Amino acid sequence: MTTIDDLRTTFFDECDELLVDLESNLARMEEGDADVINAVFRAVHSIKGGAGIFGYDGLVAFSHSFETVLDLMRQGALESSSAAVATLLTASDMLSDLVSSARSGAATESEGRAQCQTALERLAAGSGAGDAPHTSGSGAESFDDIAFTPVQSDHFESTERHTIIFRPAEHAFQEGRDPLEALRALGQIGEVEIAADLDGLPALPDLVVDQLHIGWRVVLETAAARDEVERVLEGLPFASIAFPDEPLPSSFSVDDKPEPGDPAPGPAPTEPPAKAGEDERANEPRGRDATQRSTARIDLEKIDRVVNIVGELVIAQAMLGQIAQGLPDESRGQIAQVLDEVLHHTRELKDSVMAMRAQPLRTVFQKMPRLVRELSLKTGKKVRLETVGEGTEVDRTIIERLSDPLTHIIRNSIDHGIESPEARIAAGKDGEGVVTLSAIHRGGRIVIEVRDDGRGIDRDKVLARARERGLAPANAALSEEEVNNLIFAPGFSTAATVSDISGRGVGMDVVRSNIQDLGGRIALHSQPGAGMTIQLALPLTLAVMDGMMVRAGEDVYVLPISAIVECLRPQRSDVHALIGTRGMLRLRGELVPLVYLGELLSAASEARELSQGVVIITESSQSGRLGLVVDDLLGHQQVVIKNIEDSYGVIPGIAAATILGDGKVAFILDADKLADLAAAGFSPVRGAASAGVFSALSH
Amino acid sequence: MPYAGALKVLIVDDQNSVRQMTRLSLEEFGVRNVYDSGDGASALKFAGSQPLDLIISDYNMPEMDGLALLRAVRAHPVVRRLPFILLTGRGDKELVIKAAQAGANNYLVKPFTAAALREKIEQVVGKLQ
């Protein structure tokens, strides 16, 4: 049963969509396109309408002022100038705040709101056209002077009488059919007079108790049309039904297919009439060419519950696998086969559930045009934003946490990357810079790129700044990549003056850690003079992942498969001793520092001898490769990620925990943090520059 | 006198919350056969295929607004005489005049109560029982 509270939730969900539409259309407002202005108007109007129904008066008042300005623009009485659009953008933010506070039930009054509303009213008043046609109607909601078309149809002038005779099949009871249903259904659409037709009743000795010998004659007085009565009766257990008042008596039986002339059974009342007409295409554009599909809005909590259950299923299945291992060979083979199938289905189930949580990146991408517009206004640079792959889907939790990092990267690109129009033209480029935001699925991850055609990274400047700040040792020869990566180092900023745009106290280091918190990697490519690309590679989901089970001493750990480059058993001769390290592995000419997982996490490990262990080469974006020495590889498994930070706080090197097939808890390793941990342990050089030292030493 | 339980009403509004609210209001006074549609085009298609007694349509919708739907209904060979109530924003007199000229049977200003909705419907189809 739908309750008002459910509807409120629906309303606020709609508001979210409308606000996103509003924002993206506002950014295009200055073009003066009538469709865009109409769309903006509609969004505000819809919010106002819904707010009125649910009694959010503050929201109604504010959106009314907003709408008035938009209506004037729509009519051409007010120009959508830069200044006006700026006011509208502020108003859109305010509207968004008001919606959130209405949702949370907080007070909606604030100074900002009043100010913004005044600004809107001033804008409307300034047009000279005033607010007249729309506010004068406060008390005049009744327009008695307007003559409406009287209803011409004879639908309601009188009710009709139908006489219906029906005679259920004798064996109706044996088939579990109850003629009473039909009588009740008729009673629901009008007044009925029912008389039993006992003509078919046999003499008492011939009476069979479980057979139906009688029929009924029903006089139905109803406003419903004939075909509607038929539809009510359709599907009910009659052998025959007749409308004797018809000139040509027709009859139909539920056992027959409907005759060609019969009305097709309509959708049951209270069902939406046409699925394609539903407005719940949350993820589809509303354009004419939008593919129409039917969708249902599902509470996220419900999906999360399914995700959790799938997680438990994955664990239970792992346990089953473990038990099967212990069985005698003959039964194990059979079980293994079935288990494989279960594994396959579980994986598919997991993927399907994850797909339900997935959302297109559009919601994040749509916020960016406005950002670019504001930035180009502030910096005086001409910038065009191109987006590719905004339909790419990724888990909702990831989408929610992508907005800030992407905003910052784009700010950074425009602030530091894109040159002024003059400088661009002098460099032989188009005066207008291009920032491309793209997303693509690649190898079970989603790869998001922000590419600009600006000046790229000034490596000398970066290096000088890093040395000045003590982020890189003065004598280390850093590779190009390592220099580029310095911009991700904490406390790094190349802007001579802290600008209004990038300098908000958040550096690229925060971006990097945000992305890493999501289990992602960030990489940077720069070509001096031609531009720079920042690439984010993120997991599609945060709930279940593919992991490699490894053993260190008594303990089992899980290493995300995505972090593993290769596994090998090196020869003793491949390992070189180096002071301050636990040894360096020579791998195809490159020196990779070795880290003993057991030592690192202070677990007792037997296999200190490298020859008995396995080296897993991991790669992290900032510290390069690392050889993780473990005692054994136990195999590949899907694991359910259980957050431990809430209970235990942040543990260095540990990302989360999972439950293994035997019910034990295992930690999921954080490859990037392990590298940091190792670096802190054996090298005086920390963080980003540590890899540089290694490569310097290897030359 | 139309029987509320037999009245078949199609609600057209692009906002699901408004559709559902209208449905709840209708159910409050016994209208059970309620269909709804999120856009004018599919509403028109549906109206042409089903026996209906009343369309209640919002004005403010993308693609085809309520007035366009009304005009399309009035130009439709099958449903041209179907009673039509237009939902409007607050006090938009010009729109109400346009709607009346286009053949609307009544209008209703949002937000509305179930009683107001019933009153408007009764003005159009007669007293409900």
Image (spheres, rainbow, N blue to C red):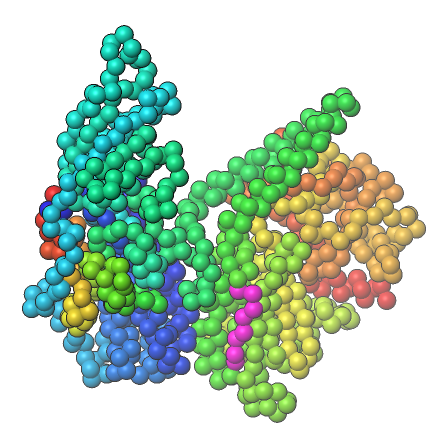
| Relative horizontal placement of residue A592, taking residue A467 as reference (left or right) | right
View extreme (front): residue: A248
Above or below A374: residue A670: above
View extreme (top): residue: A205
| Relative horizontal placement of residue B27, taking residue B49 as reference (left or right) | left
Question: Percent x, y for residue A108?
Answer: 27, 59
Residue A86 visible in the picture: no
For the N terminus of chain A, give its image quadrant: top left
Q: Which residue is drawn at 39% across and 60% down?
A: A17
Magenta-highlighted residues: A383-390
Question: Percent x, y for residue A372?
Answer: 48, 75
**Relative to the observer, which residue lies in front, A575 or A92?**
A92
**Which quarter of the figure has residue A262?**
top left
Q: Residue at x 57, y 38 (%)?
A: A311
Question: Percent x, y for residue A624?
Answer: 73, 60
**Which quarter of the figure has residue A640?**
top right
Asked if residue A384 lies in the magenta stretch, the reply is yes
Residue A383 visible in the picture: yes
For the C terminus of chain A, give its image quadrant: bottom right
